[in-house]
């Protein structure tokens, strides 16, 4: 948390002393984007401090024009502070009493108005951060649904959330984190729904952050609040869609907005939260359930298809007579285990290359990798066709996983199971699979069991995981977040 060890300095009554402090503290006249506009209002010095690029110039010009016109319409007055306050034509004007607050607010994009003889300065919110307009996130596209998504501006992000939840009990608590970055972070929740203990835990964790800056924004915040360590499985869920964020707020979750990040953090979350996708709720319940099941099968294939196929290759006697065709029909100079790992790492290389390749070239690169590299590798005897087939199906299951972080974590688990199968065959598969289930079932995210509602088992909640309920049928909020108000709809609905 940004907390200066120095004593808070009161605002001097002499604006020249404020200017000297701004020169010494933030490099006024050294940094080209820092500026001050000096005015003479009713024979009093008035300074306006700003940062170019973070402020709306039109607002500043209008405010300066109004202040200058005071000299034409007012006589000398002892109450110049009140006169100036009334002429600050903006809906967000607040007084501050320390120089530290003035510096923090100016560097955040607001302007500070300092008046000679006054121990208070006025802060006017004329921020206009550079950035893009809300648009559909690339990683959470839908066939039918809203096309607006979060951007790097926290003000816009909270606004498009409040547009969906016009409830007087919706709260956005804002604080600054980072001694140097002073990053704006907002905690969002619905007051009569969210669990107060959960809110207090998140608020306490955020206030306890001590770091120079949060240049990696939400990811750095996540590492502080959940203390994940080297556990590859995601303990929070990210989303760039405002409708998903609003849905989780109504369920009782607490959401963290971090300025400069186009995604928000949903807390707490379980393994099954990372398997949800908005497309399930943009289709009919039957279609949504079908899509959900296909996705579940894809995740299972991404984890266990390759290890099972390798096991049957190494232990062909374990196959029933009807499935004897499974396994390579040709012998190669390279062991099947090595081929599988080469194929897996090849898929990972391709995925990384696609991320770092411009969109116009990504399709051509994928075509080259799929057609030329894959076919030529088979022709020269580097791979057998079955390895390419099962590796591709496993990769498609990974791509079908909505959460990128969960897909990568499952890939790491799959590689570990493959190693166990390659070394110990059947016992290795059984032991590795058992350890996998034990490890993920022991994970807790903000005191939330990771495999809920499977472990511990909750029949009603598990049914909702398997079957996509219709909106009128979803009357109870998930108990995992322990909401204060458990019913989404009135009891008589």
Image: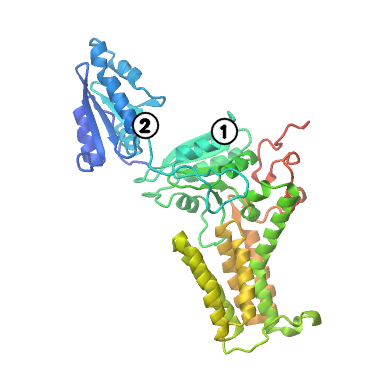
- Tell me whether the residue at label 2 lies in contact with that at label 1, contact meaning CB atoms closer than 8 angstroms: no
Q: Nearer the viewer, residue 22 or 342?
A: 342
Q: Secondary structure at mark 2?
A: loop
**On the picture, is 419 further left or further right than 102?**
right
Outermost residue, right side: 321
- Distance (Cα) linking label 2 and label 1: 24 Å
- Answer above or below: position of 445 versus 352: above
Q: Nearer the viewer, residue 196 or 276?
A: 276
Q: Residue 396: x percent and y percent?
A: 62, 66
Q: Earlier in the sequence, mark 2 or mark 1?
A: 2
Q: Nearer the viewer, residue 355 or 249?
A: 355
What residue sits right under mark 2 in the picture?
126
Q: Badge 1, how many Cα within 10 Å: few under 14, some, many 20+?
A: some
What residue sits right under mark 1 in the picture?
170
Q: Residue 137: x percent and y percent?
A: 53, 49
Q: Badge 2, how many Cα within 10 Å: few under 14, some, many 20+?
A: many
Which quarter of the figure is the C terminus placed in? top right
**On the picture, is 485 further left or further right than 147?**
right
Q: Residue 383: x percent and y percent?
A: 58, 82
Q: How is the image coloured?
A: rainbow
Please tell me which residue is depicted at 24% across the width and 9% down the height of the picture.
Answer: 75
Q: Secondary structure at mark 1?
A: strand
């Amino acid at each position: 948390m940004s907390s200066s060890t120095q004593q808070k300095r009161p605002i001097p009554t002499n604006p020249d002393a404020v200017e000297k402090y701004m020169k010494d503290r933030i490099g006024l006249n050294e940094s080209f984007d820092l500026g001050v506009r000096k005015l003479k209002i009713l024979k009093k010095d008035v300074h306006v401090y700003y940062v170019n690029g973070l402020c709306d110039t039109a607002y500043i010009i209008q405010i300066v024009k109004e202040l200058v016109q005071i000299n034409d319409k007012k006589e000398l007055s002892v109450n110049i502070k009140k006169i100036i306050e009334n002429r600050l034509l903006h809906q967000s004007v607040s007084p501050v009493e320390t120089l530290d607050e003035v510096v923090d607010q100016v560097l955040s994009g607001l302007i500070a108005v300092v008046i000679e003889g006054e121990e208070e300065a006025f802060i006017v919110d004329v921020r206009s951060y550079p950035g893009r307009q809300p648009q559909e996130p690339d990683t959470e596209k839908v066939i039918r649904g809203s096309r607006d998504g979060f951007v790097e501006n926290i003000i816009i992000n909270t606004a498009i959330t409040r547009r969906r939840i016009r409830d007087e009990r919706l709260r956005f608590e804002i604080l600054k984190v980072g001694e140097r970055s002073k990053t704006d972070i907002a905690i969002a929740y619905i007051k009569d729904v969210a669990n107060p203990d959960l809110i207090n835990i998140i608020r306490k964790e955020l206030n306890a952050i001590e770091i120079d800056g949060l240049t990696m924004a939400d990811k750095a915040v996540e590492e502080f609040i959940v203390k994940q360590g080297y556990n590859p499985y995601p303990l929070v869920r990210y989303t760039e869609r405002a409708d998903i964020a609003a849905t989780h707020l109504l369920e009782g979750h607490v959401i963290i907005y971090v300025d400069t990040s186009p995604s928000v953090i949903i807390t707490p979350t379980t393994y099954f939260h990372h398997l949800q996708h908005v497309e399930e709720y943009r289709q009919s319940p039957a279609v949504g359930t079908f899509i959900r099941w296909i996705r579940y099968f894809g995740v299972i294939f991404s984890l266990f298809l390759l290890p099972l196929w390798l096991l049957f290759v190494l232990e062909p006697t374990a196959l029933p007579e009807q499935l004897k065709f499974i396994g390579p029909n040709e012998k190669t100079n390279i062991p099947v285990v090595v081929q599988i790992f080469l194929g897996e790492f090849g898929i990972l290389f391709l995925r990384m290359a696609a991320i770092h390749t411009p969109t116009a070239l990504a399709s051509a690169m994928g075509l080259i990798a799929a057609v030329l590299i894959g076919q030529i590798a088979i022709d020269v005897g580097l791979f057998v066709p079955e390895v390419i087939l099962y590796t591709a199906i496993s990769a498609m299951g990974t791509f079908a996983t909505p959460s990128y972080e969960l897909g990568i974590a499952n890939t790491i688990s799959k590689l570990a199971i493959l190693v166990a199968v390659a070394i110990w065959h059947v016992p290795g598969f059984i032991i590795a699979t058992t350890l996998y289930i034990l490890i993920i079932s022991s994970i807790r995210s903000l005191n939330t069991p990771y495999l809920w509602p499977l472990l511990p088992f909750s029949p009603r909640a598990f049914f909702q995981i398997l079957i996509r309920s219709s909106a009128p049928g979803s009357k109870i909020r998930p108990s995992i977040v322990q909401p204060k108000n458990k019913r989404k709809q009135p009891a008589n609905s």
